[in-house]
Amino acid sequence: MKSKSVLLSSLALVATLAFGNANAAVPGYAAVSPEGLKLIPNTKVDALYLREGADWSGYDKFALLECYVAFQKNWQLDQNNAQSFRVTDSDVIRIKKQLAQMFQNVFVKELTAKGETYVTAAGKGVLILRPSILNLNIAAPDTMNSGTNNLSLDAGQGTLVLEIFDSVTSQLLARVIDTEVAGASSFMISRSGLSNRADATAVIKSWADRLGTALQNARAGAKAPKS
């Protein structure tokens, strides 16, 4: 069995290889989560929490729960106060449903492309991924009555909270928190439903790519010989 120091070294290696180095960790996060996960500093995500001593070597499959989507507080009200068109309750529900489905499709496609095996049931060697996109703020939402001249510097932003569980024990192994801005531009450009979907897809692909690399490196680190 690996010593505690080797396990800690593996965790640090996973964080570095998976998400890269940054100049400083984003402040405002506790060193230890309420579940006992430890914050790994100096990563390119806002916060990466890992369970100390977790052995990633046996996980070669993943299941993906439906992505929970929540808009930024007062987003619909602010849109309706600022725009000439109205964002209806039906628009909000439709956008959330479309984004959740997009997340499912893109995440499964990207992770399987990186060699991960997608399954739909719990079992040995299966990780359960539970994603949420919170504080979603779409700058120029595509609605039935919005017209075609929706201008903004970016498509919007959202915060991914991704929790990773052992599918058999339901033990929480990791949590990733990361806020991204989609479709950023240095000048105002016209936005549409098509461009919003393309910008959102690019962000989700980036999250999936980093997670796929993280899982690969976690397995490699767990299998590395003791020094």
Image: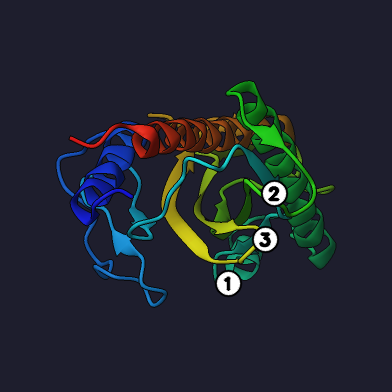
Q: Which residue is mark 3?
A: 68
Q: Mark 3 or mark 2, which is nearer to you? A: 2
Question: As rendered, which of 51 and 66 lies closer to the eye?
Answer: 51
Could you tell me the amino acid type at mark 1? Answer: Asn
- Mark 3 vs mark 2, CA separation in Å: 12 Å
Q: Position of residue 153 (x, y in %)?
A: 46, 37
Q: Position of residue 177 (x, y in %)?
A: 42, 55
Residue carrying label 1: 74
Residue type at mark 2 is Leu
Q: Residue at x 55, y 55 (%)?
A: 137
The Cα atoms of the two marked residues, 1 and 3, are separated by: 18 Å
Local crowd size for mark 1, using a 10 Å CA cut-off: few (<14), some (14–19), many (≥20): few
Q: Nearer the viewer, residue 59 or 115?
A: 59
Residue 119: image quadrant is: top right
| 69 left or right of 172 in image | right
Mark 3 belongs to which amino acid? Tyr
Image quadrant occupied by the C terminus: top left
Which residue is more in the foreground, 64 or 69? 64
Residue 60 position by quadrant? top right
Q: Is residue 84 left or right of residue 227?
A: right
The structure residue drawn at horizontal position 47% and vertical position 40%, both measured from the top left corner, is 57
Residue 157 visible, this angle: yes
User: Badge 2: how crowded within 10 Å, few (<14), some, or many (20+)?
Assistant: some
Q: Residue lying furthest bottom in this view?
A: 34
Q: Can you identify the residue that label 2 sits on?
A: 64
Find residue 185 and report its horizontal and vertical position in percent: 43, 30
Numbered mark located on residue 174 in the image: none
Q: Is residue 183 left or right of residue 125?
A: left
Residue most toward the front?
1
Q: Secondary structure at mark 1?
A: loop
